[in-house]
Amino acid sequence: MKLPSCRDRLEQALEHIADPAGEGARACLTVYAEAARAAADAADARSARGMSLGPLDGVLVSIKDLFDVAGEPTRAGSKILAEEAAPAAADAVAVQRLRAAGAVIVAKTNMTEFAFSGIGANPHFGTPGNPHDRKRVPGGSSSGAPVTVADGMSEIAIGTDTGAVRAGRLQAEPAARADRGRISTEQDAGFDRPDRQERRRLRKSRRDYGARDIRPARADRTCRIEAWGGGRASAGGSGQDRSRGILGGNGATEQRRHECRP
């Protein structure tokens, strides 16, 4: 049986995003329809010639609104940044590597404002409904990312941690989290990395409440990036292996260090 082309799968994903009865308007803040169509056609042309750029070639990907895309502001789920932030000068390194690997970037996904909650609510752009119960929250801060996979708007969704793992767990989507430093966080807006004041607050919370899962950022740590995958993109290897092999650039340990002295 002939497999559907990348362009066919993309058009189906765009239909899901545009469906007024669906979650597309809340899950996707920017849709790159024409650029995605051009990338999908290029992937199909390579496939017809028996060529491939690797396991991500022709795979539909959404990216969290925390990564720079050249020519547009990185909102980080904030209405203020949407209106006042300067356009990014270049794509984030992770986005550059996705494009170089042949991935088709479909949309930028909604998130908790400044990545500052594990619930996933956003009062400015709406809150995507959990695919298993639309009346429930999706989790966050990468709230729109797993929704795009579950609802057929993308095949892989790129999010970030602090709270990204909760979004995947709440929606029961398979997730792969790369080790810190494995995937570059250059030109990631970085709102999910606590500053010094936040680190003191988290440390106090650990003393007061005995929480074991609160781990503030340190100078030798970097933001984790997480990916959800479903459908065709999950076949033939784990999402974690794909993230390491493609986005990491042959195991490169490019890191962006953030000073958080006590």
Image (cartoon, helix red, strand yellow):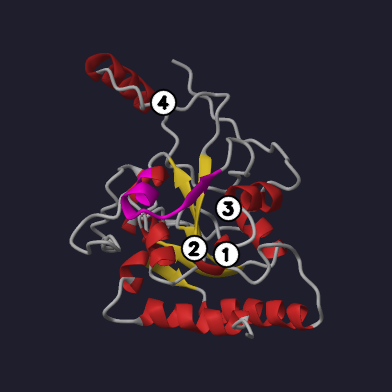
Q: Which residue is mark 1?
A: 233
Q: Which mark is residue 230?
A: 2
Residues under numbered marks 1 and 2 in contact, where contact means CB atoms less than 8 Å apart: yes
**Placement of the N terminus among the 4 image quadrants:** bottom right
Answer with the quarter of the image where residue 111 lies. Answer: bottom left
Of helix, strand and loop, which one carries label 1?
A: helix
Q: Is residue 262 magenta?
A: no
Residues under numbered marks 1 and 3 in contact, where contact means CB atoms less than 8 Å apart: yes
Label 1 vs label 3: CA separation? 8 Å
Residue type at tag 2: Gly
- Eye-nearest disc, 4 or 1: 1
Q: Nearer the viewer, residue 143 or 194?
A: 143
Q: Nearer the viewer, residue 260 or 241?
A: 241
Q: Residue at x 35, y 44 (%)?
A: 166
Answer with the quarter of the image where residue 79 lies. Answer: bottom left
Q: Residues within 10 Å of mark 3 (few under 14, many from 20)?
A: many
Q: Residue at x 58, y 24 (%)?
A: 220
Label 2 vs label 4: CA separation? 29 Å
Residue 139 in the image: state x and y as whole percent.
31, 50
- Could you tell which of marks 2 and 4 lies nearer the N-terminus? 4
